[in-house]
Amino acid sequence: MKNKIQQIAQEIETLAAKNNEEVEALRIKYLSKKGDITALFNDFRTVPNEEKREIGQLLNQLRDRAQEKINDLKASFESMQTAETAIDLTRTADPIALGTRHPLSLVKNEIIEIFSRIGFTIAEGPEIEDDWHVFGALNFPPEHPARDMQDTFFIEKNPDILLRTHTSSVQTRVMTSQKPPIRVLCPGRVYRNEAISYRAHCFFHQVEGLYIDKNVSFADLKQALLYFAKEMFGEDTQIRLRPSYFPFTEPSAEMDISCNLCGGKGCPFCKYTGWVEILGCGMVDPNVLEECGIDSKEYTGYAFGMGVERITNLKFQVKDLRLFSENDVRFLRQFESAW
Ligand code: DAH
């Protein structure tokens, strides 16, 4: 009996199987009703009494070991099967390439956010406009060069219809459709007939601001723009207004900010002046108010317009404007995380 137990014990230690069926065959061979180990248990009653204790223990050990071995073999096939055929719920999902926000959108949204905090809402208008909304109502004289084919894209069949050259056309739309007080920000794309190079493109983006109410003064304009410059470029930013000319504002100015790269000390970026230009602005010309049906004796207003590409370049020093519209994801991916 002892020899038999030892022999089976040895067999058990070297058990191997190629698949589940073979494991099951082993189980039947050793542990089923007619199995070898079960047969030894059946023979147990023939064991002399004085040996029963020892043989009983050996038999129990043998049965437990056989069961353990067969369970292990079974488990090994089960885990292999899982790896090969079943769905692994613990696996991380395939990464879906999420896009990032376009740098111009990031900057545009920031401009909107800053002005919305002081009460500006958004107004939008069409990119294909008529002469009156883009030029006529805004005090452009008939012979103004912007009305030349060299500068503006006209829709061929109708010289009155053109691609807007500035978002100031949305001012016209707002003033002719709303009553003061008006406080709007007009973001949008504009088009100009320019040769494309690293510093000019045939389309770009602007944000226009317009505020019309009783007693709006140049001091209000200056204060709003100073607030904007500090929010956008940092608390230490200074502004300076230089007299300028736009047909639709009087007086008109261009605004510089202290160079945000060198802090105003002078560097190649600001051409060693310490200042960089960021926008045009002024008091809405009374002619424009009247043309749009607003009483210029009762109301005054200010306006400003800035290029989104320009502000983005100041923030990120993008050297080539064309990158903004080439949609190279290696370029576009850099901005959202840096914002
Ligand atoms: N429309 C001007 C341009 O495209 C920008 C501008 C300047 C807008 C002064 C304004 C303004 O509203 O007051 O260059």
Image: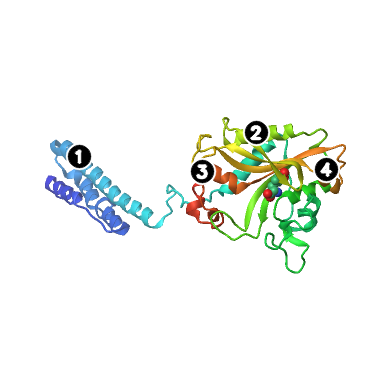
Q: Which of marks 2 and 1 is nearer the N terminus?
A: 1
Which one is in front in this view, the residue at disc 2 or the one at disc 1?
2
Q: Position of residue 53 (x, y in %)?
A: 17, 36
Give the x, y percent position of residue 261.
51, 38
Sequence-earlier tag: 4 or 3 = 3
Marks 1 and 3 close (CB-CB < 8 Å): no
Residue 286: numbered disc: 4
Q: Label 1 belongs to which residue?
A: 56
Spatial CA distance of label 4 from label 3 is 37 Å
Secondary structure at numbered mark 4: helix
User: What's under tag 4, amino acid-wise?
Assistant: Pro
- C-alpha span from label 3 to label 2: 21 Å
Which numbered disc flags the more N-terminal residue, 1 or 3? Answer: 1
Residue placed at 50% from the left, 54% from the top?
Answer: 329
Residue 74 screen position, x and y as percent = 31, 51
Q: Which amino acid does label 3 sit on?
A: Phe
Which residue carries the number 2 mark?
226
Label 3 beta carbon within 8 A of ligand 1: no
Q: In terms of sequence position, does the residue under pointer 3 or pointer 2 come before the other?
A: 2
Q: How crowded is mark 1: few (under 14 residues within 10 Å), some or many (20 or more)?
A: some
Disc 2 within 8 angstroms of ligand 1 (CB): no
Callout in the foreground (1, 3): 3
Q: Is residue 15 left or right of residue 182?
A: left
**SS for dot 3:** loop
Question: Helix, strand, or loop for circle 2?
Answer: helix
